[in-house]
């Protein structure tokens, strides 16, 4: 298993000029020719965003990196949700935790039940960078949706996250389409479960296969509640400015593909960062993560996550390891910050 099983080497360092935006609410209003109408539309979109907003849910991976006890983390930090990683194929179209641990009856089910018992929420993530994916192994959208349904029936998540970054899913457009069509089936059968797609990004926003996925989802009418961009391993130097730029690029692409306003596009957007050092040695400090969180909240983004609780421990100069962040930090500080979203 690679040091960071979620995202190691998936993108080469990308460079892009920061997007320059301004007057978001005013510009949206004036484009419609009526300030009052634009303001009303943005207010409606803002209300929709608040209704769809998910609590901050950092990734927790029980198969890697000395994972902490989830309910102890909840008590210590105030976090109320986790994104549980990763649901993979144990062979063919059969889902299993990390492709190895049983769907039910093991530590993952015990942890989910404990989180819910403590009043928390759970998102379940399918995919990630490493391992055997369900997308390429399920022969049809219906088969893939059936595998996802097994997971929903077993664990009752509040959201399902399709982390599309491995080349077998991200760069294979037939598999991309299969995933998008499966999401539509899943949403039709589970209207109260939120659907999330998490994809890589450049500093200017999703590029190549990621941009194609956004356009294709709009063409197919796939009911995706949230598009989250992974704002790391993109060659950033100022992680606050570059993360904001990437999220603004996502917003612009969602607007263009779906005909949404700024507020509507932000309401379908999310950020997933990486605490401390990334694989490309980008550094995100707790102070920077707080700035990013506050910007995301102010813009009305509906999802906020990071990789991973397992790494939310200080180890200055430690590099990118399986159980610490590589920087000096109080233990669980990024989780505390994320809980404030």
Image (tube, grey):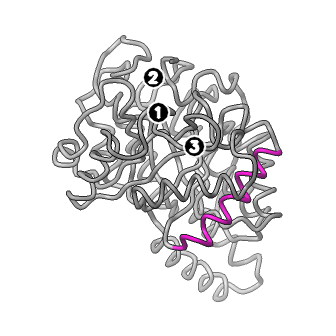
In the displayed structure, would residue 253 be above or below residue 103? below
Q: Which residue is mark 2?
A: 277
Q: Which residue is mark 1?
A: 274
Nearest to N terminus: mark 1 or mark 3: 3
Q: Secondary structure at mark 2?
A: strand
Task: Determine if the magenta segment contains residue 262.
Answer: no
- Cβ–Cβ under 8 Å for marks 1 and 2: yes
Q: In the drawing, does residue 156 fall left or right of residue 218?
A: left
- Rendering quarter of residue 24: bottom right
Q: Secondary structure at mark 3?
A: loop
Task: Determine if the magenta segment contains residue 182.
Answer: yes
Q: Which residues are magenta?
A: 174-191
In the displayed structure, would residue 263 be above or below residue 169? below
Nearest to N terminus: mark 3 or mark 2: 3
Q: Please identify the quadrant where the C terminus is shown.
A: bottom left
- Rendering quarter of residue 27: bottom right
Most foreground residue, 153 or 201 = 153
Most foreground residue, 290 or 92 = 92
Q: Which residue is mark 3?
A: 94
Identified at 21% across, 58% down, the residue is 117
- Rendering quarter of residue 171: top right
Callout 3: few (<14), some (14-19), or many (20+) C-alpha neighbours within 10 Å? many
Identified at 63% across, 44% down, the residue is 93
């Amino acid at each position: 298993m690679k040091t960071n099983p979620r995202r190691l080497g998936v993108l080469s360092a990308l460079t892009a000029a920061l997007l320059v935006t301004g007057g978001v609410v005013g510009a949206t209003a004036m484009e419609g020719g009526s300030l009052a109408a634009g303001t009303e539309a943005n207010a409606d979109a803002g209300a929709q965003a608040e209704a769809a907003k998910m609590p901050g849910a950092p990734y927790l991976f029980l198969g890697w990196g000395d994972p902490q006890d989830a309910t102890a983390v909840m008590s210590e930090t105030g976090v109320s949700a986790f994104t549980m990683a990763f649901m993979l194929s144990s062979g063919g179209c059969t889902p299993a935790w990390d492709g190895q641990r049983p769907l039910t009856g093991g530590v993952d089910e015990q942890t989910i039940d404990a989180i819910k018992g403590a009043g928390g929420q759970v998102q379940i993530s399918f995919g990630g960078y490493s391992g055997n994916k369900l997308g390429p192994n399920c022969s049809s959208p219906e088969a893939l949706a059936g595998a996802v349904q097994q997971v929903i029936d077993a664990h009752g998540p509040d959201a399902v996250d399709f982390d599309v970054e491995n080349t077998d899913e991200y760069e294979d457009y037939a598999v991309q389409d299969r995933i998008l069509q499966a999401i539509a089936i899943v949403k039709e059968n589970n209207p109260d479960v939120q659907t999330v797609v998490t994809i890589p990004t450049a500093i200017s926003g999703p590029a190549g296969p990621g941009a194609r996925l956004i356009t294709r989802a709009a063409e197919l009418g796939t009911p995706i509640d949230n598009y989250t961009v992974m704002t790391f391993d993109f060659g950033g130097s100022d992680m606050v400015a570059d993360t904001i730029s990437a999220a603004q690029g996502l917003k612009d692409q969602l607007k263009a593909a779906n005909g949404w306003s700024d507020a509507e596009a932000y309401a379908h957007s999310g950020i997933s960062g990486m605490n401390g050092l990334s694989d490309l040695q980008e550094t995100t400090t707790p102070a920077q993560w707080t700035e990013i969180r506050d910007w995301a909240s102010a813009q009305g983004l509906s999802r906020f996550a990071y990789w991973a609780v397992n790494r939310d421990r200080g180890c200055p100069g430690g590099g990118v390891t399986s159980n610490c962040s590589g920087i000096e930090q109080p233990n669980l500080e990024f989780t505390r910050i994320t809980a404030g979203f």
